[in-house]
Image: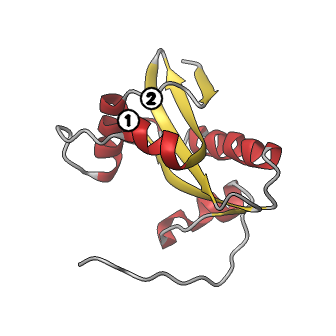
Amino acid sequence: MTIRIEVRFTVDDRQLSGLHARAFGGDPAEVRPWSRQLARSALTWVGAFEAGELVGFVQVCWDGGSHAFLLDTVVDPDRQHRGIGTRLVEAAAGEVRAAGCEWLHVDFEPHLEQFYLDGCGFRATPAGVMRLIG
C-alpha cells in the first residue's frame, strides 16, 4: 500500500487516540481532545495515511521564535520499520524550516537513539528534564 503524508490534516480525535493507544499501550476507549490541543498549541502536525487510515503522526510545538519541538511521534506498531516515521519527521522539519525556525528539538528514550540520530539527522546534545507530577 502507498503511504500518503498530509500536513495539518483534519484530526479525528478518536482515530488519533486509538493510534496512540496501540503504540504506547494506553486505554483504547480513552479519547483525548487532540484537535483542540493542536489548534491551540501546535505550529504544525503531520499524519501518515494508508488506505485512508491514520498510521503515523507527529506534532510540532514552538516558542513563537526560532525553536520548535517535535512531540508525539508515533507509527502504528504493525507498520513500523518501513520509513514512515522518517517521512513524518522530514515533513515536519520542512514545515518548521518554512516557518523560519532555526532549531528543531526532540527528546527521546534511549531505544530511539538510532532512529533520531542516524535516521533523521538529529545530533546528540546535553539536556535536562524535570518531572512535575507523580
Image location (x, y in percent) of residue 75? 47, 42
Q: Are marks 2 and 1 in contact (CB under 8 Å)?
A: yes
Q: In screen coordinates, is 27 left or right of 16?
A: left
Q: Which quadrant holds residue 16?
A: top left
Q: Give the mark toward the camera: 2 or 1.
A: 2
Tell me the tag on residue 16.
1
Q: Which quadrant holds residue 104?
A: bottom right
Quarter of the figure with the N terminus: top right
Image location (x, y in percent) of residue 79? 46, 36
Tag 2 residue = 11
**Which residue is at 43% across, 45% downward?**
37
Tell me the tag on residue 32.
none
**Which residue is at 55% across, 68% downward?**
107
**Which residue is at 56% across, 47% downward?**
42
Label 2 secondary element? loop
**Which residue is at 52% across, 67% downward?**
108
Between 14 and 2, which is closer to the camera in this rendering? 14
Quarter of the figure with the C terminus: bottom left
